[in-house]
Image (cartoon, rainbow, N blue to C red):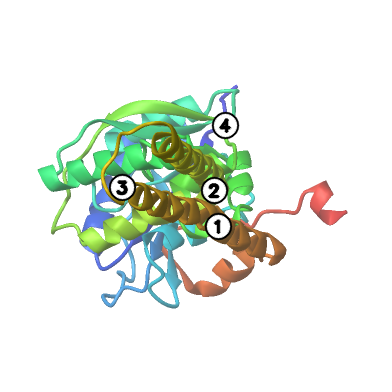
């Protein structure tokens, strides 16, 4: 008796790079063909000015290619969020992969991630770069970003978008409003167990990356903002340490002034003024952050899907058959 193929749906955001996307789809088919997977591809058109192809030639190993055209350019991370929310509605869903469409996420490694995600543990399998080929400036910024993220949040984020998720974890992560800002950080914030697979960065099929320095900084800050509560706790402890330091400076200055003959003219006033500045900063920073967090908690956040799915302007089948929509579970009916 033959074992039914597991359905793997690949979500890839595309912005004016349809030649690379078509090449990636063909390479995914070649890499996954004969591996026991039924592969679908969902290309999320992130408001491209260049229209997608009307049809794609059927690729061996790929059953269906669908294009979700967004109403506007939402950005890379939000395009991923919309794609995940759209595929979560499908009835035929076992695994979901997130890949960039430029070829830097290597299709040859997709089967390794999918095989590991097919295990009984229901863990997210993420690609961790064992080798990086970017320029020196990018690597320096990435090193600084990962260390700053660890310092502020207490967690490691040394992986990107290239991920394979079991269907149950897809439906879990899309309920997190922070997926709208940063997919990898939302994965961590959702407490989804993660396993790492060492991978190599692939070569872009064509063109240059459109991610500039400003975009990289915005991406890093978006990831840190997802774990803002952890950041607040760490800043609170840092502020308490600064406050204790200022108290220590004041006590030390008073001791030297009153009980010793050391010191220079007006030095005590300078030390006390410096301690006062530190104390004000140490008190104001956590107070401001506390008000921001409390205001955020008091605001009812809509589920991302209520906004994201409304951004889909058109769903177009580029190759293969159309998938069935997901039937509601018993809990959802009740």
Choose between 277 and 79: the one closer to the eye. 277
**Residue at numbered disc 4:** 4
Tell me residue 66's x, y (percent).
Answer: 44, 61
Q: Earlier in the sequence, mark 2 or mark 3?
A: 2
Do tag 1 and tag 2 residues touch (Cβ < 8 Å)?
yes
Residue at (26, 75) in percent of width and height: 50
Q: Earlier in the sequence, mark 1 or mark 2?
A: 2
Q: Earlier in the sequence, mark 1 or mark 3?
A: 3
Q: CA separation, marks 1 and 4?
A: 52 Å
Do tag 2 and tag 3 residues touch (Cβ < 8 Å)?
no
Quadrant (top left/top right/bottom left/bottom right) for the C terminus? bottom right
Q: CA separation, marks 4 and 2?
A: 48 Å
Q: Secondary structure at mark 2?
A: helix
Q: Name the mark nearer the viewer: 1 or 4.
A: 1
Choose between 74 and 266: the one closer to the eye. 266
Q: Secondary structure at mark 4?
A: loop
Q: Secondary structure at mark 3?
A: helix
Q: Name the mark nearer the viewer: 1 or 3.
A: 3
Please determine whether, in this image, residue 79 is positioned above or below residue 311.
Answer: above
Q: Earlier in the sequence, mark 3 or mark 4?
A: 4
Tell me residue 328's x, y (percent).
Answer: 75, 54
**Residue at numbered disc 1:** 289
Q: Secondary structure at mark 1?
A: helix
Disc ID at residue 267: 3
Q: CA separation, marks 2 and 3?
A: 35 Å
**Pointer 1: residues within 10 angstroms few (<14), some, or many (20+)?**
some
Tell me residue 200's x, y (percent).
Answer: 23, 32
**Residue at numbered disc 2:** 232
Please determine whether, in this image, residue 77 is positioned above or below residue 256.
Answer: below
**Pointer 4: residues within 10 angstroms few (<14), some, or many (20+)?**
few
Do tag 1 and tag 3 residues touch (Cβ < 8 Å)?
no
Q: Name the mark nearer the viewer: 3 or 4.
A: 3
């Amino acid at each position: 008796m033959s074992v039914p193929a597991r359905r793997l749906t690949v979500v890839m955001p595309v912005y004016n790079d349809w030649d690379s996307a078509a090449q990636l789809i063909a390479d995914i088919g070649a890499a996954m063909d004969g591996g026991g997977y039924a592969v679908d591809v969902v290309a999320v058109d992130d408001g491209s000015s260049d229209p997608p192809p009307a049809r794609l030639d059927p690729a061996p190993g790929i059953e269906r290619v669908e294009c979700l055209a967004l109403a506007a350019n939402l950005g890379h991370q939000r395009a991923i969020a919309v794609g995940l929310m759209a595929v979560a509605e499908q009835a035929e869903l076992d695994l979901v992969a997130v890949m960039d469409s430029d070829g830097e996420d290597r299709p040859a490694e997709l089967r390794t991630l999918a095989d590991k995600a097919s295990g009984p543990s229901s863990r997210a399998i993420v690609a961790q770069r064992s080798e990086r080929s970017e320029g020196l400036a990018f690597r320096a910024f990435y090193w600084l970003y990962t260390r700053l993220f660890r310092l502020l949040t207490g967690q490691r984020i040394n992986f990107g978008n290239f991920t394979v998720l079991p269907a149950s974890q897809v439906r879990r992560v899309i309920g997190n409003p922070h997926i709208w800002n940063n997919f990898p950080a939302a994965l961590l914030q959702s407490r989804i167990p993660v396993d790492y697979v060492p991978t190599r960065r692939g070569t872009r099929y064509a063109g240059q990356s459109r991610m500039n320095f400003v975009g990289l900084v915005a991406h890093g800050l978006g990831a840190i903002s997802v774990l803002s509560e952890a950041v607040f706790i760490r800043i609170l402890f840092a502020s308490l340490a600064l406050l204790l330091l200022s108290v220590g400076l004041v006590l030390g200055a008073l001791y030297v002034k009153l009980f010793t003959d050391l010191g220079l003219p007006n030095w005590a006033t300078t030390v006390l003024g410096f301690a006062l500045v530190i104390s004000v900063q140490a008190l104001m920073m956590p107070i401001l952050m506390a008000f921001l967090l409390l205001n955020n908690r008091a605001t009812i956040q809509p589920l991302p899907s209520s906004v994201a799915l409304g951004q889909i302007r058109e769903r177009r089948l580029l190759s293969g058959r159309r998938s069935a929509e997901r039937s509601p579970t018993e809990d959802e009916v009740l």
